[in-house]
Image (tube, rainbow, N blue to C red):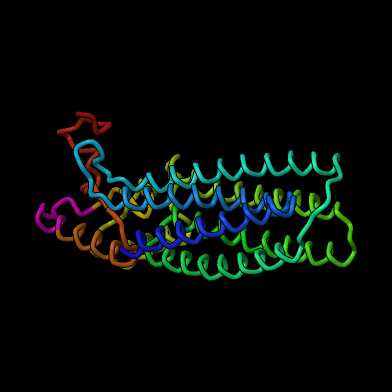
Amino acid sequence: MKRVKAAKVSIISNASLVCLKLVAGLIMFSISIISEALHSIMDLIAAIVANYSVRKATEPADSDHTYGHGKYENMAGVVEALLIFFASAIIIYESGMKIISGTGVEYIEIGIVIMGVSAIVNFFVSRYLWKVAEDEDSIALKADSLHLKTDVITSLGVFLGLIVMSITKLAFFDPLIAIGIAFLILRAAYNLFKESSRGLVDEKLPAEEEMVVRNVLIEHMPSYIEFHSLRTRKAGNQRFIDMHVVVRPEMSVEDSHKIVDHLEQEIAKRLPNTSVLIHVEPQDWRNSPALGKKGEI
């Protein structure tokens, strides 16, 4: 499966970059590169979490998870966001300590090369992950891709900062760059947390997706009277939609079933990975003598 393969690619690339950055940062005494290494460690952990979650999310529904395992991907996104918050706090603290101590940076040329390589690798891996995430509608892979996009920006920032340091010989650029990286990461973490948590709190589908559902219903309106109580939510890449459809009271059960079955198929065709449940109501059923004035049994 493409999602699982993409997650493996992310793990391999992140593991390689962690080793490169850690070695370079320790040799150079550079907090900005060590911060980048820490960032990549968080990316590596995130990639491992994404790998687990996309595997788990593809498992079919069972007796304990009757709606499937899609929310494992949302959980993975939240975990990744929290990891980024943690990494940012460490970077800011270590950068502040280095500003106070005033420690210099050595072997700047090594860092320039490694940061350049890191930016290039993460750029292509991020694009690959995003394409797979879009094709598979995977929140976990989108989260992983966003991590790497941030890593591209921060790596380029360190790359340029090291070039400036090699020209000006001003060591304080190193911790200042690291702090800038931390705030960029914090912004990415906030956006990731916001997107991932939507599925956990059963937020409705985006307006454009709900409009797709409404358009299908409106197109088929002549075959029934009206619809109401439309509800939508999403878990991982799985959408869940339910509603009530009102039909003519003389319509047979078989005919009403055919109508809602067709509606469900049309909605699922336009919105992949969608489960649709439609409750049929005869017109004016609440005023039926068998149910009393308020439609209560």
**Residue 242 inside the magenta-drawn segment:** no
Observer-nearest of 92 and 159: 159
Q: In the image, what residue occupies the spot 73% across and 60% down? A: 158
Task: List x then y, in percent, for residue 169.
Answer: 89, 60
In the rendered view, does 82 fall on the left or right side of 134?
right
Question: In the picture, residue 108 is in which quadrant?
Answer: bottom right
Q: In the image, what residue occupies the spot 60% across and 70% down? A: 120
Residue 256 visible, this angle: yes
Task: List x then y, in percent, for residue 133.
Answer: 43, 62
Task: List x then y, in percent, for residue 216.
Answer: 33, 65
In this rendering, the answer to whether 259 lies above or below 34 is below
Residues drawn in magenta: 247-257
Residue 241 visible, this angle: no
Q: Quadrant of the C terminus?
A: top left
Question: In the picture, residue 23 is in which quadrant?
Answer: bottom right
Task: List x then y, in percent, for residue 226.
Answer: 31, 55
